[in-house]
Image (cartoon, grey):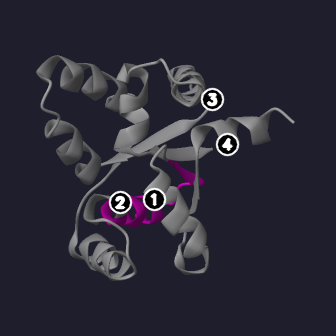
Amino acid sequence: MRLYLDTCCYNRPFDEQSSDRIRLETEAVERILERARRGELTLVASEALALEISLTPDVERMVFVLELYSLAKDVVFLDEDVRTRARELNDLGFKPFDALHVACAERGVVDVLLSTDDHLLKKARARRDTLKVAVQGPVDWIMERIR
C-alpha cells in the first residue's frame, strides 16, 4: 500500500490536542506512521511537501515534521508534467499547494492521498471524477482498514 500524506497530516501530531477531532486524527496519523516505520506500507513524499514543510515558521516544529517526512521511501519531483497537472487542478479550484500534492500523489501512483484539510477533502470529493488518486481523511482510511 502506497500513501501520500499532505502537510496537514504530518503536522497533526504537533497541533493543539484539545479537540476530539484533532486527537482522533492525530492517533490515526501516528498509527499510519508507525506502520510505515514497520514497513507495512510505503509513504510517498514530494518536493512540494518538502517545500511546504520548510515554510513552517516554528523552526522546532519544522524539524520534527521533517523527521516524520523522512519516513517516506519515494519522492516525487516537480517536473513539468507535475506542474502542468497542478495548474489544471488549480484551475478546477484546488489551492496551489493542494493541487501540487494531488498532482504529486497521482505521479507517485499512490493508493490514497491522506489529508486533514477540509477544503481539500471537499474539493476532492466534488472532483473525484477528474482525479487519478483517491483522497481521504486519515480517520476514515484507518476505519476502513479495521472492518
Q: What label does residue 98 carry, if any?
A: 2
Q: Which residue is mark 3?
A: 40
Q: Amino acid at mark 3?
A: Glu
Say which quadrant the N terminus sits in: top right
Q: Residue furthest right?
A: 147
Look at the picture and state if 111 lies above or below 28. below
Mark 1 vs 2: CB contact within 8 A = yes
Q: Left of 30 or right of it: where is 139?
A: right
Give coordinates of residue 59: x percent, y percent: 12, 22
The residue positioned 36% from the left and 31% from the top of the image is 11
Q: Residue furthest front?
A: 18
Q: Which residue is mark 1?
A: 120
Instruction: Say whether residue 101 is magenta.
Output: yes
| Disc 4 from disc 2: Cα separation | 19 Å
Q: Earlier in the sequence, mark 1 or mark 2?
A: 2
| Disc 3 from disc 1: Cα separation | 26 Å
Q: Nearer the viewer, mark 4 or mark 1?
A: 1
Query: Over which residues does the magenta segment extend?
Result: 99-114
Q: Left of 141 or right of it: where is 85?
A: left
Q: Amino acid at mark 4?
A: Trp
Q: Which residue is mark 4?
A: 141
